Amino acid sequence: MDQPVARARARLTPAGAGLAVAAALPLGFLAVFFLWPVVAILGLGLSSGSVLPVLTSSETWRLVAFTLGQAAASTVLALLAGLPVAFLLARIRLPGLALVRAAVLVPFVLPTVVVGLAFRVLLPAGGPVSIVLANAFFNVAVVARTVAGLWTHLDRRAEDAARALGASRARTFATVTLPALTPAVSSAAAIVFLFCATSFGVVLVLGGARYRTLETEIYLRTVQLLDLPGAAALSLLQLAAVLATLAVGAAARRRRETALALRGRAESARRPAGAEWAVVALALGVVGLLLVPVAVLALRSVSTSDGWSLAGYQALAGTGFPGTLEISGLDAAANSVRAATDATVLAMTLGVTAAVVLVALRRGRVRRASVELMDSALMLPLGVSAVTVGFGYLITLDKLPGDLRTSPALIPLAQALVVTPLVVRIVLPVLRSIDERLRAAAATLGAGPARVWREVDLPLAGRALLTAAAFGYVVALGEFGATSFLARPDTATLPVAIGRLISRPGELNNQMAYAACTLLMAVTVAVVLLVEWLRLPAVGEF
Amino acid sequence: MDVIRRGVVATLVFAAVTGCSVFGGADEDGDPGERTVVLVTHDSFTMKPEVLDEFRNSSGIRIEVRKTGDAGALTNQLVLTKGSPLGDVAFGVDNTFASRALKEGVFVEYRSPDADKGSRRYAVDGTDRLTAIDVGDVCLNADPAAFAGKGIEEPTRFEDLTDPKYKDALVVQDPATSSPGLAFLLGTIAHFGEQGWQGYWSGLKANGVKVVSGWEEAYTQDFSGSSGKGPRPVVVSYASSPAAELGPDGRPRTRALLFTCFRQVEYAGVLAGAANPEDAKKVVDFLLSQQFQSNVPEQMFVYPVREDVPLPAAWQGVVLQPSNPETLPAADIDANRERWINQWRALVLG
């Protein structure tokens, strides 16, 4: 649908200049902390050897097929499991839903190695089925909360009208609700696909050395063999797959993204009725399944070969078994919260700025292709191997003042690289769906641009912003790769401590590792509940 | 409405949390004018803070520890950054990666005065660029209770594991993704020779060897002697692992099989292009000092290289050192690692 109120054709106005400055912030960040390092390491690989042996090997193409296949299967499963949960969170008014909203985020914070071990307890055989299940386990939250962010604000009256005209619930969902949700669903699917295509720990633990992906192979060639040409060849394939995914996702969004009559949550959530109870039961079943691996971890934290014991928790209050931790588990928890706050603040700043710029560019008369280019560029970090970026840092960031390569200040920057695309994908569908006429009306009534944002966009995007912040927080809390490289012994976070404990022999270390996981989950739920509770009534309740 | 209360709490929580965060906090350690040496090392490095503090007080040098993955990741990062090093001194390059680091010119020569007290027994070459700091052994670990329950004796040698008596007993790690897995593969190559190792692994495969990616799965889940109580009574781990598996009687529940060990030596060296090479040398001396060496066993589960440092009481009779572990020249490992891993993958996983 076209904009009823179009801006005058581009000449550099003050607003246009402001937009350019705002766009420079996320794009500049991306250029320095992503493009430059990745291009540098790929360039080094390409100039130091031939990529042909890798590209022409049939083994490589088997890797590509398995990588894409498991990612596609995981994405479908996460969508199927996540949509009922999204319905529950968006449309249903029942007591205790805040807890469900927090619980679905718990998988996201858990170290992949630990989740892999929990899945090995549940499904000892391992293999592709376990990999797909574990990937879906992590990503149900992405679908549920991204889609719920839009669904919450969808005007219910269109559906009610369809029902009144005799459409079945299924037909109403398929012809009215689902098309309106498509921007959020395709956003979520793109993110989940990228996460699964680059999933590392899960594939390593559950693939049992037999199943490998581009990501694990890039790790092997870069970190262990220092075969940079081979790694560059695989990275280019990974990049090509990511770009193809993004193009498909953008095409899906282009066809469907329309202004919607967004409403406040109070109007759209109801007590379930009739067949809705079946969907609610399905959603609660999904949440229940998500909690099974979580329960395995919690059980292991209190079981020893001599019966039940809280020794793991007691040890965690101190520094535990000699030689394992340099700070107490509680200090590590505090470090986690601090580091995650930094990353979230940074990612929210970058992500919301980027989303606002993308929306403003679309409203203005900027060519659609360049808007989409910026949109896709912001997603790229999700699809490129963390190892490629990390090794790229080693050969580039020393040229910046203050040599960030081994500095703890790089932790929030590296984490923001992952969190920012999430923020954009969660916030953008909602901002784009806001009816331009609502904004135009506000402007006509005398509101300046800032006031329009405050009074129209912000209330409608409120829940999406909170979801984005909660997500960012949880991703940063659970982040392991960059943190384990960059954290000092005394600034170690809980995931780093868990990684250390799990790699040591001894029953107490093992119990402490699981106790630390439980602590991490408790911190996550507490943080998410706090974010929910802090939600000002004015925001998100239109 | 409690809007104001929530706003105030939000602000307070935010301030409390970010007030001392990475961005907001001052670097409490850096006394002005204090000399700092950046020690680049692997994830397994640990030392009591007291030991580091004592060195700081006696020498005026603060050691800043930066961990960067396992020994392989550490070495490759040092190679990649040799023109602009990540620190002044590195610790943790082992004998499986030493050749690569030396060939790439990552380290400069330095011979510590204490190097003659045991360290030089493990010298890679005659150039003194790498100083041996500790020694560890990757060995098969067995669960004696499981074998006693079945009424068969424990295996003792590599060859036993291909005996049908021990079918489905062994779990190992993929040498491509695990450093103990690589060490065990190298041990079999050293023991059976370039001609014989593939035949041995074919035998292991026929006898039901299980391969997993990492030590964590193998030891904590598949091995029957750990708290995971898995199904397999033999696993690739370290000679020191039994020290962490003590039963109620204070005796270890597991046993390292001392005829199946591969020796790993960890080295330290002053990085070429170090900002502070003189103090970096003093840190190498510190790593060889009585004080540091005597804490190496219980902090990092390895043996000190110094001959005049006794093992801790808790290790007496619990951690046994193999008298004749398998070894391979560092240069051979570096030249053949990738080929061996690929051959192993084709053979065992193919």
Image (tube, coloured by chain):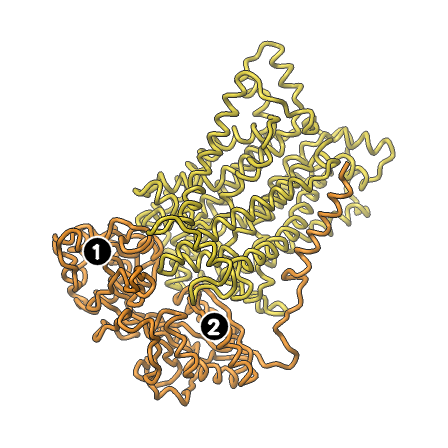
The quarter in which the C terminus of chain A is drawn is top right
Which amino acid type is shown beneath numbered disc 2?
Lys
Residue position marked by numbered label 2 in the rendering: B48
Q: Is residue A191 visible?
A: yes
Chain of residue at mark 2: B
Q: Marks 1/2: CA distance?
A: 35 Å
Secondary element at tag 2? loop
Residue B82 image offset from top left, x and y in percent: 48, 74
Q: Which chain is orange?
A: B
Q: Residue at x 66, y 50 (%)?
A: A350
Q: Quadrant of residue A426?
A: top right
Image mark for residue A460: none
In screen coordinates, is A520 left or right of B306?
right
Secondary element at tag 1? helix
Residue A41 image offset from top left, x and y in percent: 49, 61
- Given the current orientation, which residue lies at the most extreme front position? B249
Tell me if residue A149 comes above or below residue A93 in the rendering. below
Q: Which chain is yellow?
A: A
Residue position marked by numbered label 1 in the rendering: B145
Q: Quadrant of residue A2?
A: top right
Residue A64 image offset from top left, x and y in percent: 39, 45
Residue B181 image offset from top left, x and y in percent: 30, 60
Count of labels in the image: 2
Foreground residue among B88 and B243: B243
Q: Residue at x 48, y 40 (%)?
A: A193
Foreground residue among A495 and A132: A495
Q: Residue at x 51, y 58 (%)?
A: A317
Q: Is residue A53 visible?
A: no
Callouts 1 and 2 in the same chain: yes
Chain of residue at mark 1: B
Which amino acid type is shown beneath numbered disc 1?
Ala
Q: Quadrant of residue B333?
A: bottom left
